[in-house]
Amino acid sequence: MTNQQLSENYHRGKEVKVSVTDLTKKYDDLLVLNDISFNIYKGEFLCIVGPTGCGKTTFLNCLSRFIPTTRGDILVDGQPADPTHHDMAFVFQEVSTIPWLSVEDNIRFGLKVKRRPPDEVERRTEQMLELVGLKKFRSYFPRQLSASMEQRVVIARNFALNPDILLMDEPYGQLDLKLRYYLEDELIRIWQEIGCTVLFITHNIEEAVYLAQRVLVLGQKPATIKEEIIVDLPRPRNFADPAFVKIRDHVTDAIRWW
Amino acid sequence: MHHLSRITFIVLALVLTMGICSAQAKDEIRVSGQPCLHGLPTWWAIEDGWTKDKNIDLTYTLFPSGAPQVEALAADQWDVGAMGTVPTMMAILRYGAKLIAISNDESETNDLWVRPDSPILKTKGFNPKYPEIYGKPEDWKGKKILVTTVSTVHYALDATLKALGLTEKDVEVVNIEQGQAVTAFASSQGDVVCLWAPFSYTAESKGWKKVSSGARSGAMIPGGVVVRKDFAEKHPDLVVEWLDLYMTALDRMRTDKAGSGVWLNKYFAGYCGLQLPESAIKSEFELRPIFSVEQQVKALTAPDEASAWMKGVADFFAGQGRITKADMADLEKSNFGIDASFMKKVQEKRAAKK
Amino acid sequence: MSTSNVKIAAKGISKSFTTENGTIQVLDNVSLEVKTNEFLVILGPGQCGKTILLNCLAGILPPDSGEVILNGKKVTEPGPDRGVVFQQYALFPWKTVRDNVAFGLAIRHMPVKERYEIAQKYIDLVGLTGFEKSYPHQLSGGMKQRVSIARSYANNPEVLLMDEPFSALDAQTRYSMEKELLSIWEQEKRTVVFITNNVEEAIYLGDRIVLMTKLPGTIKMEFPLTSPKPRNYTDASFLEMRLAISEETELAL
Amino acid sequence: MANAAAANLKEKIGAVFSFVIFLALWQVASMAVGSEALPSPADVVAKAQEMYTSQIGGKSMWMHIYYSLRRVVGAYLLAAVTGIPLGIAMGWNVKFRKIANPIFELLRPIPPIAWIPIAILWLGIGEGPKIFICYVGAFVIFVMNTYTGMRYTDHLLIDAARTFGATRRQQLFNVAIPASLPSIFAGVQNAMSMAWMCVLAAELVGAREGVGFIIIQGMDLNNSPMIIVGMITIGLIGLFLAVSLRYLEKLLCPWRRELQ
Amino acid sequence: MSTAHASALEAPATSRVKGYWKEYNSSVFSLLVFLLIWELVCRLGFISRFQLVPPSEVIVVMIEKFWTAPPDGATLFTHIAASMTLALVGFCAAVVVGVPLGLLMGWYKPVMVLVRPLFDAVRPIPPIAWIPLAILWLGIGIEAKAFIIWLAAFVPCVINSYIGIKLTNPVLIRVARIYGASNWETFIKIGVPSAVPMIFTGLKLSLNAAWTTLVAAELLAASEGLGYMIQMGRRLARPDIIIVGMLTIGFTGALMSYVLTKIESRIASSRRL
């Protein structure tokens, strides 16, 4: 199959979850995002890669309404995106466990803010502790945990909400290789189990190709979408597989940022 | 090495300068005083040049109140000075100072004031022995009284309460400094305020009424003129010389009230920074009896005068638990530090001149 | 290998620390040799005592037992013959770039003119020309680390000890710094001991990789790397080596 | 950049606005409680004009300010000259620290104002005790901040210097002291406000000149506008001292990011 | 590793008691030498005993003062209790007002724009300069003194709460916002807890300022308290009473900050910060 065909096949008959049209963001005179348009489908795992400082984070901030857009719309289920209405979850690049809350209270945090009934809060928290394997550490505080455990707490906190959309901003950037492999596999497992829509932003091409069903390549300032690549490799994927390396090299060429 | 020698040089230079400064031709007498009538004589002597043809050199240090003045005595900062009864007694008791003269009788200028609407003003002379004290004991009971504790006004207050058959337990005593007492009383704090001059003049100008005083309640409050123990022993002649000057000023105050008033005004306004109305200056001389050399000698030697007055104050302190029995015994043993010898010499000197 | 070729060597180094929670054995009988102008990478997970090992090599920390030999002589103190590049840069915030780079020379009381000439050479080498008068806080992380590298180089050490120098940098800067470090090293060869927890970085830079275990730190394995530099991240041999090494590391959860 | 300017302008307008509200409230309050207890802003301005053009206690207002400043600055410099070296020695030399610290810790918690009686006992009246009180206040802060700065010097910097073969002396002068400068400068600011407070306390307790005397004079004369003018003068001088020190710090520590 | 590194350098402790002794023996020694010199200076007459009382006498007077009221009118405990009450009233009032104000200033821009200029304008006026106005407005009871102390303690409370909440990790704010938390909810759930360590530093500074100002406050209209005790010592020319008063102020102040530090570390350890 050619790329063209692959792409057409991929897009056919998919339900749009998030639609981004003509998204533009200017800081004073500095144009950061320029006319970005794309869709994210329901239940899709989409990766966005691009060089550092290309506006990836600005884009996510627009999506989650932390900052107003200059122009363009972001619609979730046909309505303007708004964290108070839509079930969004966000895993940040920086560790974002809340230091004064224990592991279980961290997981409860989102549920409580969303004013879920107490029995549901407890049920979901237990489920999540089980899912990320932190039952034994439920009363620990973030300071007592390793980096990977903290990241798992954050993931559990977000999945506890059963979010429609999970946004992840370079969550594994600072972790070492083996741990990253482990958490990537875990993410895929949870995603497959729960079936939410994931938007994963990374600078690591290998990671993007390993995780995504589809990769969007962002170009250098101001950010625009340079290319879309469908990754149709079976899971679990293998880094050394020549087909994998081929896609990886393809994405690398598309970016050309070093 | 280079640095060291430079430092040595500086130190040497400093030592030399200090040496030159201290080696004066005239004998220096360091005098202390307060912004008060009894502070005037020395300042007057200096300003008016009374020491020009004398072989002494006066330096004058002003203290805001008795406590720092006595503290400075401990620091060896002055030789002779005039102050209130309480600091005088402390200087005698703690530092062995000598009481060599009575600057004035302050009994009337340590007084108690109320606002014009006070019920205390309704009656006068409840105790016929003290006809000038206002109020019945019931009127005084439970009143909040602003007073600088451990001071001469406190003594006057104590005597007033006694005259009415009351004790401090019957009223509410609040300790406060004089200036703050005026401010507080002006903003409707407390029922009675105990002040000494010149603060009493502010009270008068505000229309407050005097209800008692040391004099009215039979408490004799003499202003003390004291000399440091060491100085008295080492330079008795200098003490006499200065005391002579002091008495000269007191004599003028007794005889020429108008002329002295001009100087007192200068002293208050120009030196102490106190702006007082003319009436207050006049009151200063009217309310404060001043003793002549002869009266002084008598007061210092007669058993029922200075020593009795000082004992009255000491008893008050002992009653309050401020001084111990041992302290009291010390005071009595030294006859309250009273030393009439200097005043007698002044008397002799003056007699010889005539 | 012949011993005469050995520049710096650790012999049976052990080190432990006493804390409130008892004694922690950090290094257990670690021995290694680094040849002249060799680029040795010590790879290990976080908290495996590799920084402590480097501090022992530098002479900053005395080992409990064992010794460090430099040019056949025992090391007891830090010295200008061993330059250290720290993870947190350790630049002097009150000195300009130029004065930072010239620090080691100033310590030796070299005349200012000469000092600045040498400093300039290394500032140029690390590509910071034009930033001589900037203060560290005005620089990005990558630039700071360049200053740190220049500072070590300017002192002309025989051995360069680098303690996870790029781990605080973002990914893109990290890649370019790795590339740049290689080119600097090619231009001015030094004996380098480079510490990292990043497998790719290790394979990209090293002549030889020494893999350490978790606490107590011991040397688990050695991987000689023979392929020519600069290496390609997606080369089959690169990926193979990466797999081989990561198979040997433990998963730190 | 335009945004920043707009934000700046907004802040300025806010500041003016809040002062206007404050003055209005003041005016209303003074009308409510009477000018005896709280003089109106206009009263205070009139009084200020009078005070700055005439003499109080035989000296002009400027002389009073000069006297207070002289005491503060003298004590402050003395405290800096003695306190900073002591802090450095305590922070650098373990033996010296163990000897000096307990004595310092014994005396440190005693508030400077509590030293007033002892100061007079030792130094008598006059400038001595006033300077001493300010000195005590500033000295403690200088020592504490220098000491803290020295003790929390990033050990990495010392290690870095050692790897270049710096001697112990070079480590002290080329690394530890410059690295402690920010902390010392924090002390420089605090010590000044402490000294300024202490001079007031000393002057309140007994002085014939200085800004503290102005306030006491206002109280003795029962003149509340005078008190308020005195307070405002004190505040302005305090502010002036703080601002000039901040400027000095900017000048001397150009490498500090927070200041720019 | 760096913590292990530092603590290893600081305390090469073997057994606990022995370690403490080793750590503190020179300190104890230096204090003893200090007291000895003090004693000798007085005994040998280098300083007149009117100016400084030897430590042995100070200790005797201090012990006596535990149960005897004369000459200053109250026992040491009464004075301590009076001063502590005063300081704590002022301090607590400052905390209750200052901390929320600082937090609100740090979180809500309009509050900051309105309050900051006034705060900055009032701040350079030392609290003791307010004494005359305090008497004028609040009289001579505990209110005026508490007000002076309140002023002193208020400033660090505001500043530290303000800085504390300004330093809130922005990521945590975003975490709350992404879950749809309102601004107020984010303030309560994220801003306030994350400011706690800084607030505690502020409380310590605040308590220190309160205690420092205490003596000045007690100079006005007090009939008991440690400041009054010193004042009486002056009027009665009793240097021993003055020094006992000073030392008691020092000890009590140190004790109070120690207690606060303990409370802080208790809270911090329960939160494992």
Image (cartoon, rainbow, N blue to C red):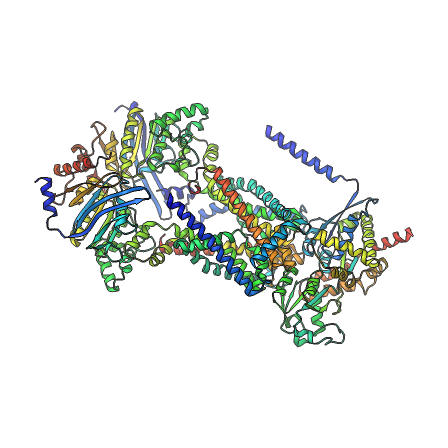
- Residue B325 appears in the picture as rendered: no
- Residue D54 x/y as whole percent: 66, 50
- Quadrant of the image containing the N terminus of chain B: top right
Is B53 situated left or right of C253 in this image?
right
User: Residue at position x 19%, y 43% from top?
Assistant: A216
User: Residue at position x 69%, y 71% from top?
Assistant: B161
Residue D95 against residue E98 in the figure, above or below: above
Determine the image quadrant of residue B302. bottom right
- Residue B314 x/y as whole percent: 72, 63
Q: How many marks?
A: 0
Determine the image quadrant of residue C52. top left
- Residue C200 appears in the picture as rendered: yes
Is A98 situated left or right of D118 in this image?
left
Residue B80 against residue D29 in the figure, above or below: above
- Residue D11 x/y as whole percent: 43, 50
Of all residues, the one furthest to the left in this rendering is A1
Which is nearer the eye, A62 or A151? Answer: A62
- Residue B80 x/y as whole percent: 76, 51
